[in-house]
Amino acid sequence: MIDKPAQTSSGAGHMSGTSFQVNSLFLDYIISQETKENIFLPLEITVLQGESSLNVQRAGQHLAIGSSWKRDKFVLDSLNFSRLRSLTVSREWRPFFISHRMRVLRVLDLEDTNVKNDDVEQIVAHLLRLKFLSIRRCAKVSCLPDSLGGLKQLQTLDIRHTYVAKLPVSISKLRMLQYVRAGTSVALMDEEPSTTKWGRYGHVAACDGVKVPTKTAALISLHTLGVINISATSDMDIQQLFKNLTQLRKLGVSGINRRNIKGFFSAIEGHVHLESLSLQLHMEKDLEWLHKITTPRNLQRLKMKVHVEKFEHWSCLRVLGQIRRLQTLRLHFKTDQDVELQFCDQMDGVAWSTPIQFCELKVLEIACSSNLHVKFADREMKELELLQVRCFDGSSLNFSGLERTTALKDVSLKGSFDDTVKEELRQTVAQHPNRPTLKLVEPRSS
């Protein structure tokens, strides 16, 4: 939330007022609430770090507890919190950081701390005026308390990269909630061949979302929701869930499969405000059912992550290529077969009688555990800007027609390639008319 500190007004080892670069989300919130909350810029910030001693009796509008501060309860108890609107904590959390004197606290950012379930319950019980709560990357949090429904003014809840698998039913009481950010999705470039990833705090699911109660449909003010998991949700419940969420601008969904895809797109068909949609497809042996995708008419951006278990020249590329507004495509091939991807207007020598394929695609990510050959044609992928490829365990990589992707800006490759393959890749990229940036990344040794 707070980015880079500027020069402080006092020497090291003291608590002081200072200036910071503020994260855009936080800044937008402050500006939007300026009249209501009597918040004025520039921000008055109090910072606790190192051996901070007590030289300020009243905390500013924002209190930042740095990772280096020695967690002195006496110092914190001596502060006047009458004007404190936001609190950011780095790394180590202590229960005494929360005080009943923080009556006007609106923003609490605990990203990447050691907060646990009991701590979250205490926070929810004491800070009833919260509008923004982030426990992102707090891997010791596995559930949210039912008392969450008591935060009647909550507008943003960020629980990404935690172990929270489902939202409590009481979330339906939060009628002012606008942003729910959840799920543990990671980039393909960081994934291993299995569907899980070892994170900093242990085992983290690589492609997952949270389950939501159907009563979430009562949150009619929601602008952002996801990633939510609908793999075990019936068509009736899907319809009920999305029926009243007509104000959604951004939606992320995992667990899309052949059984629920038609019901899901039927449920969001009339969502005229939906601009961004992210889909994680459930792994199945074939994906021909993708032709059932019919995007909402005002959709601007579609992201798709596809796990492929069986590969037979994968003719469903033709279906994917025709999906409107598809701007980001992530393909993960978990197969022992060699993979030949033909992003072109013919397959096995037979021309497709279809419009230009992938005409809006800007980002293409491919992860493969076997030998990979990617072919591009003259008419396809004219908007492609970023190509990322990850190959595992000595698999080989070859590009054909890469120079035809005329808008290409960046190529990122991760894998253990021999010198011959690396040199061929460098020459291929060097001959590209747009001279894209090439990044070769060696995988970390285990």
Image: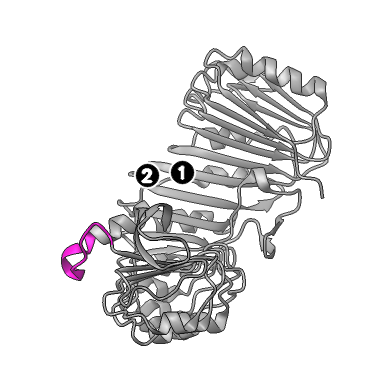
Query: Which class describes the residues within 10 Å of circle 2: few (<14), some (14-19), or many (20+)?
Result: some
Residue, disc 1? 302
Query: Which class describes the residues within 10 Å of circle 1: few (<14), some (14-19), or many (20+)?
Result: many
Q: Quadrant of residue 124?
A: bottom left
Is residue 121 shown left or right of residue 156? right
Q: Nearer the viewer, residue 352 or 127?
A: 127
Q: Residue at x 49, y 22 (%)?
A: 407
Residue 42 forms part of the magenta stretch? yes
The residue most toward the front is 11
User: In this picture, is 211 found above or below 325?
Assistant: below
Q: Residue 333, how many percent across, how many down? A: 72, 42
Q: Are marks 2 and 1 in contact (CB under 8 Å)?
A: yes
Q: Residue at x 47, y 60 (%)?
A: 226
Identity, as a three-letter code, of the amino acid under mark 2: Leu
Q: Residue at x 68, y 44 (%)?
A: 332
Q: CA distance from mark 2 to mark 1?
A: 7 Å
Residue, disc 2? 299
Identity, as a three-letter code, of the amino acid under mark 1: Leu
Q: Residue 341, how many percent across, how many down? A: 68, 29
- Residue 123 visible, this angle: no
Residue span colored magenta: 32-43
Secondary structure category for the residue under label 1: strand
